[in-house]
Amino acid sequence: LVTNASIYIHDWPRFPYRGILLDTARHFLPVPIIKQHLDAMVYNKFNVFHWHITDDQSWPFVSQKFPQLTEKGAFSSDHVYTPDDVQDIIEHARLRGIRTIPEFDTPGHVAALGRAFPEFLTDCYNGSIAGQAIYGVHAEREILDPTKEEVYKFMNEFLKEVKNIFKYESYIHLGMDEVYPACWMSNPNIQNFLKENNMSNGTDLMTYYSKEILKLMKSIGGKSMVWQDIWDDGVKLPSDTVIEIWKDTSLLSNSPSWSYYLSKATSEGYDAVLAAPFYLNMISYGKYNTPESVMNLEFFKWYNIDLFENFTGDNIARQRLIGGEAALWAEFIDGTNSLSRLWPRVSAVAERLWSSIHINNPEDAQFRLDIHRCRMLRLENN
């Protein structure tokens, strides 16, 4: 940090939102490792830490209102983030100009929550038998049950606590992705609820749940960020909702391209963030034996992405594309390899989100990356 110095920096970002997602639920990341990532983020001009803190695998976030969440949902008592840990991370990020947006994904991705509150989960049926998994369709119990009033009481109290903890940040990421309704539709109690409320399918129930949670967020003075799924389902979101685009033909064969989704979301009046082409947990190993193979390395693929590629929105819609985010999902990531898996590969994304589109020479970028990697090593970030 430089203070009281006569320095003029002629530089500015192309996009205001330049994020990195770290997944601390599938595998736990120790606090010192997260801080190293935050240090590296500021050296690469990232300014948003999207903290995917909970998921099916574990619930490491210590709630003072609901301590049973970590008592039963964490990997162990050593694999948790205490209130002091969370404040330490938030402050470490804040002092580096980085926002911390927490994600607590519901109604799916909640198996760890269900270990503390099994009554909140939906019993899946195989025929007339409850609690029966059908392989490839649903588990024994999964997804919050949106027909239960106690689910909303819990979410209201929990989101209030989260909003108070992350007091510098107006947005909370609510997830809302990858909810597969087969379990809901197998449950006779839910089928009765649908009939009584003039609903016909899982999409209707997801719409019902998401509207209730979005109202809760507004009532506590928070703003919502969501994965695109509920918007795909036609849910009318509050105008200040940020939609994160993760779907693309490269990830889902029956999906349109991410440029289609970006154009559509921003043209409908929503701010949007692009994550689809920047899943850094996916590794492909390249060769350096020909110029063509070098150019197919991941760094150059990310470097050559233009967020406005095939964008069909007008100038107002373009302004609603607020940036992008690199995601490091943690199925195969933990404290031993997260730094080397992310850095310096993600520097390619950093340049695309910060620099002008006219700065686009990959050979020059490779040369600068070599120097930048050594610079980060000297700063003990790798």
Image: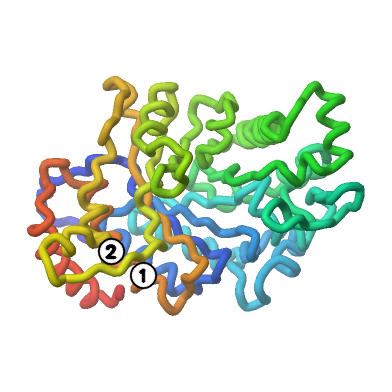
- The residue carrying mark 2 is 345
Residue at point 41%, 26% (across, down): 264
Q: Is residue 39 visible?
A: no
Residue type marked 1: Arg
How crowded pointer 1 is (Cα within 10 Å; few <14, some 14-19, many 20+) is rated as some
Seen from this angle, which residue lies furthest right?
A: 128
Q: Which numbered disc covers residue 341?
A: 1
Q: Are marks 2 and 1 in contact (CB under 8 Å)?
A: yes
Image coordinates of residue 360 in percent, x first then y, are 13, 48
Q: Is residue 281 above or below residue 181?
A: below
Label 1 sits on a secondary structure element that is helix
Left or right side of 153 for 249: left
Residue type marked 2: Arg
Residue at point 31%, 53% (across, down): 46
Label 2 sits on a secondary structure element that is loop
Left or right side of 159 for 45: left
Q: Quadrant of residue 196?
A: top right
Q: Is residue 248 visible?
A: yes
The one of 185 and 35 positioned closer to us in this rendering: 185
Image coordinates of residue 313 in percent, x first then y, are 32, 23
The one of 5 and 203 positioned closer to us in this rendering: 203
Quarter of the image that includes the N terminus: bottom left
Image coordinates of residue 181 in percent, x first then y, are 70, 41
Q: Is residue 263 above or below residue 379?
A: above
Left or right side of 75 for 224: left
Residue at point 62%, 66% (across, down): 60
Q: CA distance from mark 2 to mark 1?
A: 8 Å
